[in-house]
Amino acid sequence: MITGVYRGLLDADCVPGRDIGVIGRDSSTTRYLRPSLTSFHLNLQDLGAALGEALLAAMPAYRADFPAGVVRRVFPTRFVQGESDAASALGL
């Protein structure tokens, strides 16, 4: 999705990080964007495992294997500094 945002901005003669700040989710495809995307990285493998466990905990056939039930968790994110938020241009 962020690739489409970049494309639309460039089509409108706007440069991310110069004319507008853009922050997105880090992924394998966003690493190729220029200027580099300022982003947040989330471990999707851990998130997927937790979602699978929650799904199994909700199923009667597997409920005994997951006695805690659905566990609400906050997954940490890591800030990845890029050039699309204009902070580097402002010296921040």
Image: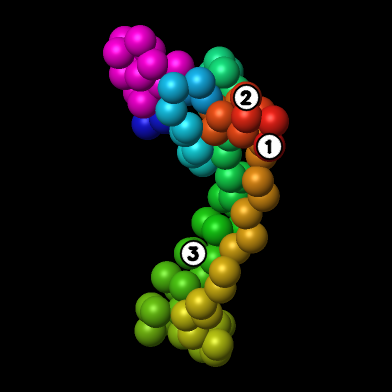
Residues at discs 3 and 2 in contact (Cβ within 8 Å)? no
Looking at the image, is mark 3 or mark 2 earlier in the sequence? 3
Residues at discs 1 and 2 in contact (Cβ within 8 Å)? no
Residue closest to the eye, 27 or 5: 5
Residue closest to the eye, 40 or 63: 40
Residue drawn where x is 57% and y is 69% of the image: 74
Principal SS element in the magenta part? helix
Task: Please give the label number shown on residue 89.
Answer: 2
Residue furthest to the front in view is 90
User: In terms of image quadrants, where is residue 38?
Assistant: top right
**Kind of residue at disc 2:** Ala
Disc 1 element: loop
- Indicate the position of residue 75 as horizontal and vertical percent values: 60, 63
- Which image quarter is the N terminus in? top left
Give the CA separation, mark 3 to mark 2: 42 Å
Q: Which residue is mark 3?
A: 52
Let me know if residue 82 appears in the view: no
**Kind of residue at disc 3:** Gly
- Indicate the position of residue 55 as horizontal and vertical percent values: 42, 70
Residue drawn where x is 62% and y is 24% of the image: 89
Q: Nearer the viewer, mark 3 or mark 1?
A: 1
Residue drawn where x is 45% and y is 16% of the image: 15
Residue drawn where x is 39% and y is 79% of the image: 58
Q: Nearer the viewer, mark 3 or mark 2?
A: 2
**Kind of residue at disc 1:** Leu
Disc 2 element: helix
